[in-house]
Image: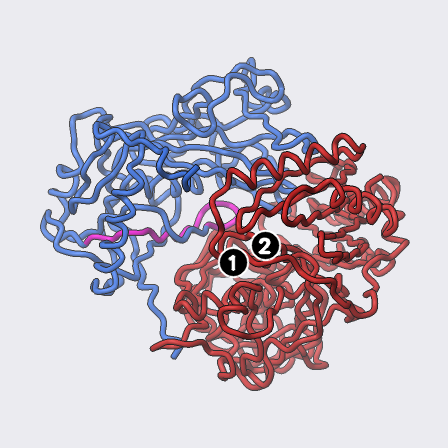
Amino acid sequence: MAILSKDDAKKILEKVVGFSKADGIEANLSGTDGGNIRYARNSVSTAGENSDVSLSVQTFFGKKSGGASINEFDDASLEKVVRRAEELAQLAPENPEFMGLLDPQTYGAEPKTFIDSTAKITPDYRAQAAANSIEPASKKDVTAAGFLEDSRGFSSVMNSKGMFAYNQSTSVDFTVTMRTNDGTGSGWVARNFNDVSKLNTAEASQIAIEKALQSRNAKAIEPGKYTVILEPNAASDLIGLMFQGFNARTADEGRSYMSKKGGGTKLGEKIVDERVHIYTDPWNEEVPIGNWAGGGGGGRFGGGGGGGQPRKKMDLIKDGVVSNLIYDRYWASQKNVESVPNPGNRIMVGGTASIEDMIKDTKKGVLVTRFWYIRAVDPQTLLYTGLTRDGTFYIENGKIKHPVKNFRFNESPLIMLNNLETLGKPMRVDGGGFGGGASLIPTMKIRDFTFSSLSDAV
Amino acid sequence: MGMGYEYINHRPQNKIVGGGGVNLYKGRYDMLEDAKAGGAQAGEKLKAKTVEPGKYDLILDPSHLWLTIHESVGHPTELDRVLGYEANFAGTSFLTLDKWESKKFKFGSDIVNFVGDKTQVGSLGAVGYDDEGVGCGQWDIIKNGVLVNYQTIRDQAHILGLKASQGCCYADNWSSVQFQRMPNVSLQPGKEKKSVDDLIKGVEKGIYIIGDGSFSIDQQRYNFQFGGQLFYEIKNGKIVGMLRDVAYQANSQEFWNSCVGIADASDYRLGGAFGDGKGQPPQSNSVSHGSSTARFNGVNVINTARNIG
């Protein structure tokens, strides 16, 4: 039952809205069929599937709102969840930032977010995918620990003003860590697609095995400022953190790096190297995402339906300049601008150079496979700390010279993107910032990246 | 109905005053008093002196130390990590089985004692039985500074020669598989009568840290960096003012071996988290970590200030 068709979802939502006695109602109906397989020590540890559909209802009396959810869909249950939401709304204090419900919206063409082959993944497929990763590892005296997770689902929203939106999507995510059995080398790789036909766990695992073997017996080099080549997953982890500051309200209220000294925001100002161009586009073929956004339309108390706002193609940073900030409907009304919902994907324009090309072009530097445990140190300067992991190599005169011990870094993605040397080929990566979804992020070469200490971790 | 906070009743007897006159709470919390103090402290912090990087003796309040315990003691003593089951996500552990087998691996100084406890009253991780039906209890993990045990589930108990699991199996949801999760892991108070003021008195050049802040540690739990909320400079045994831009970096084993003083049981408090993450698909777990204020000598402090124009 987890994937309801557009018509079936609409029928349930119409019933829910019909039960309402409140001034207004918004109902979100979504479901997911998910499956996964996990392995470690070269054997499968857990595997399973789950299937769930959930209905979430918000009702409104004046500026008071209350919500309830349920996962039963007979008429009595649907009425029960509406009554419960109404009861809670009557008990709630008024929300001073309440926004009314959305009118019916116009959406663009449906993005290709649902791929049949991904929706048809079976436990047998997952087992074979894991075997294709484990077998080559065990032949090389390497231990594999990996995870493959797939999902197919739908989401829909309707309100008492007649607004209705629906989307179906699929995704598959694969990661594997390969560790040499002597414990001195470790490699990692990640793949993320909405079309499983693009996934080859054997090919991906081979990269991680090679990294593990090459990273054995890493040498310590002095922490300090280095030119780094960040593979797309490493780059994305830091670039994604910038987007939290794109909330217009936190910028206006002086609570983020996007706040300008003395008041106002950095909208329209150049904040990074002029080659940086990041935009969102629900219809991008590599990282398609639903053409409408979920909730969050009200102000700081979340009240007031927000689900169903149309997404559009939009620049976030162009020529290094902040092009757009995100305005929830309340803050947009206060600032007298158009509301801008969270984007569902992020696309950073890159170049044509491969990682190998970028290594050849580097006199001295450090190649970083991925980062780990990144945490904010100072939100005003966007300073973050974290560590390199699973494949860190020293480059000299255009070649990887030897593996190096992992570093802790203390760096701001803003400073990093001002120290940009080269952008390479973009790759799809999981996550990467606000609004969920995937990102297209290039490999990037950065000068003067700050490593502050060494770690003994392998 | 009101806004909710009106229903939180504090108990005056639960309030204690820390170094620098900071209000701290043991048990029930006075939210309004703390909110007012927080405003004043934020103002003071804006005017505070930026820290000079270097080695300092740190006096760490339990409201801060719980997180350092969680990351540098709680996680590396999870036996599934030691065995490699978390290698692809949370990571492995530097506390490998050979270190435990040696019975002399010096994790911390002689005064460092950690217990695992899933029954501690008032803790976030308190349960009578785990998700395998095993009765929960308390056990030593670090005794007199030496690694003596880990955290186990039924599958793992035999590896350590235990007759029964320690009851550390937990799933966060109907659709999650239960696996080894962290119990409350707590630093035992000092055995000699010692107050926070006593600890501060002996420090020539130090920083007293209250509250948790930024936290990061590597996948084998060697190298960590922690921030905090309030940083008070200590000179010649006295607090002389507030500092800002403070974070400290250390290696877990070196850090716990630099522990030279722990306040007595009268200062013991719990801190904790509702969302400790682990596993794939990720699961969350609630856990507490208790301690009294403790002193660590010669820890590397960095300055976190940056200029972005």
What residue is rendered at 37% in x and 39% in y?
B5
Colour assigned to chain B in the rendering is: blue
What residue is rendered at 45% in x and 76% in y?
A265
Q: What residue type is labelled 2?
A: Gly
Number of numbered discs: 2
Q: Residues within 10 Å of mark 2 (few under 14, many from 20)?
A: many
Q: Where is residue A107 in the image (x, y as percent from the top left)?
A: 77, 67
What residue is rendered at 64% in x and 57% in y?
A101
Q: Which of A275 and B297 is in front in this view?
A: A275
Q: Nearer the viewer, residue A226 or B294?
A: B294
Residue under numbered circle 1 = A299
Image quadrant of residue A35? top right
Q: Please provide the residue range marked out in magenta.
A: B217-232
Chain depicted in red:
A
Residue under numbered circle 2 = A304
Q: Position of residue B46 (x, y in %)?
A: 25, 63
Please indicate whether residue A189 sits to the left or right of residue A274 in the image: right
Residue A48 in view (yes/no):
yes
Q: Do the residues labelled 1 and 2 touch (CB within 8 Å)?
A: yes
Q: How is the image coloured?
A: by chain
Image quadrant of residue A323? bottom right
Q: Residue B190 carries which label?
A: none
Marks 1/2 same chain: yes
Closer to the camera: disc 1 or disc 2?
A: 2
